[in-house]
Image (cartoon, rainbow, N blue to C red):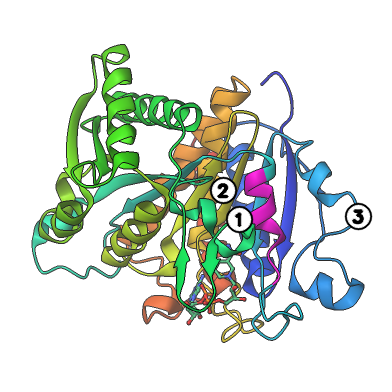
Amino acid sequence: MKTQPRIALIKGDGIGIDVTDAAIRVVDAALEAVGSARPDYFEIRAGATCYAETGADIEPGGEERAGEGDAIFLGAIGLPSIRHADGTEISPHLRLRDRYDLYAGVRPVKAYPNAPQRLADPRAREIDMVILRESTEGLFYSAAVHGRAKVVGDEAVYDTLRISRGVTERLHRFAFRLALKRKARGRPGRLTCVDKANVFASLAFFRKIFDEIRPEFPDVDVAHSYVDAQALDLIRKPWEADVLVTENMFGDILSDLAGGLVGGMGMAACGEIGDEIGLFQPAHGSAPDIMGQDKANPLAAILSGALMLDYLGEKLDAPACSRASAMIEAAIEVGFAENRLRPMEFGGDMGTRAVTEELLRQLARRDAAA
Ligand SMILES: NC(=O)c1ccc[n+]([C@@H]2O[C@H](COP(=O)([O-])OP(=O)(O)OC[C@H]3O[C@@H](n4cnc5c(N)ncnc54)[C@H](O)[C@@H]3O)[C@@H](O)[C@H]2O)c1
């Protein structure tokens, strides 16, 4: 590896702290197993507890420092009991998304053996897709945090759905490259543009740009679908989906729907990637109902750690990071298949520490076998 990766760590609140610690231990162990040094971590304090104790939702200079590493890893931020005077929650991480232009929201959805399966059809065991959610514009362009909605007294409220050429070109190229990468790893490499081009000019523009970029990637099979039909297909035949690229709000909804097919929040990993830096975090929140009880499933955070390693492998031209990433995913797959991973979230007997220790044991065995 040319350089040792530098990672900004924002543990945040509630179970965010425990699952970050778990993810870092597993990331370090996987890197050790492939003969690489652990990354250089620097911690940034942020979140609801930080706000309650210091009056600031992130430490001074924290937003700038977050961009100084090769990647950002975040646990979870927010506690419903700590709010701003207007009732909204503490969410400095949303500013990071804008500040670093993290347009590509990567949401892998994969079925693991012995993990909850919501569909009776046995083919549901084959679910393995990525939903790529644009994360800086779309209908979220006028999310409340930006104050861009137009309010006409108490009579009407208008939100804006923005699709811009610059962001959309980068998003679609990212999607095509992701499909190619998955194809190289044995997946179909099929990319579906999910929109509502039949009704909205903005989404017809989204599709037009997709079709303009398509000739640059002749080896990717492409399809188009309307979001309503796609929602139906995610229940009828989710095993056929490979990479879906879509607008922000559609991606928000479809990724939760798809995540529900393969377990729960404790399995939902997430990467938010821009051209300069990527932020990796479990999709769940701080889970105040179970915090401090060693009950949280750390696998979403650990899988986010694996996504981060895969990202670093490409960014730093460091194949060892990519190998460590694949090793973590394989350890989780085998752990479920052999019934050694039994998270409490799914009715099992293993809390945060036990799940983490089991993965560390497996990685140490691979290290010894290597
Ligand atoms: N990206 C983020 O940091 C993020 C995301 C969502 C919510 N939040 C914040 O987190 C706080 C709690 O929000 P919420 O309750 O709506 O969502 P949540 O994701 O924290 O919890 C929802 C439910 O899922 C369970 N759950 C979540 N993660 C789990 C895990 N790893 N293992 C086992 N069970 C898990 C919780 O116990 C709870 O019952 C709020 O302050 C919210 O604003 C932050």
Mark closer to the observer (3, 2): 3
At label 1, the amino acid type is Ala
Q: Nearer the viewer, residue 218 or 38?
A: 218
Q: Quadrant of residue 45?
A: bottom right
Q: Is mark 1 within 8 Å of ligand 1?
A: no
Give the residue drawn at x 38%, y 24%: 177
Whether label 2 touches label 1, CB < 8 Å: yes
State the residue position of label 1.
Answer: 23
Q: Nearer the viewer, residue 139 or 312?
A: 139
Q: Secondary structure at mark 1?
A: helix
| Residue 93 colored in magenta in the image | yes
Whether label 1 touches label 3, CB < 8 Å: no
State the residue position of label 3.
Answer: 60
Label 2 or label 1, whichever comes before in sequence order: 1
Mark closer to the observer (1, 3): 3
Q: Gap between marks 3 and 2, in whole Å?
A: 26 Å
Q: Is residue 25 visible?
A: no
Label 3 or label 2, whichever comes before in sequence order: 3
Residue 57 horizontal/vertical position (percent): 80, 65
Instruction: Give, as a single range, the part of the protein colored magenta.
Output: 90-98
Whether label 3 touches label 2, CB < 8 Å: no
Q: Which mark is residue 305?
A: 2
User: Mark 2 packing: few (<14 Cα in 10 Å), some, or many (20+)?
Assistant: many
Label 1 or label 3, whichever comes before in sequence order: 1
Looking at the image, residue 19 sits to the left or right of residue 262; the answer is right
Q: Secondary structure at mark 2?
A: helix
Q: Is residue 292 visible?
A: yes
Q: Which mark is residue 92?
A: none
Residue 145 horizontal/vertical position (percent): 63, 62
User: Mark 3 packing: few (<14 Cα in 10 Å), some, or many (20+)?
Assistant: few
| Residue 348 colored in magenta in the image | no
Looking at the image, residue 46 sits to the left or right of residue 177; the answer is right
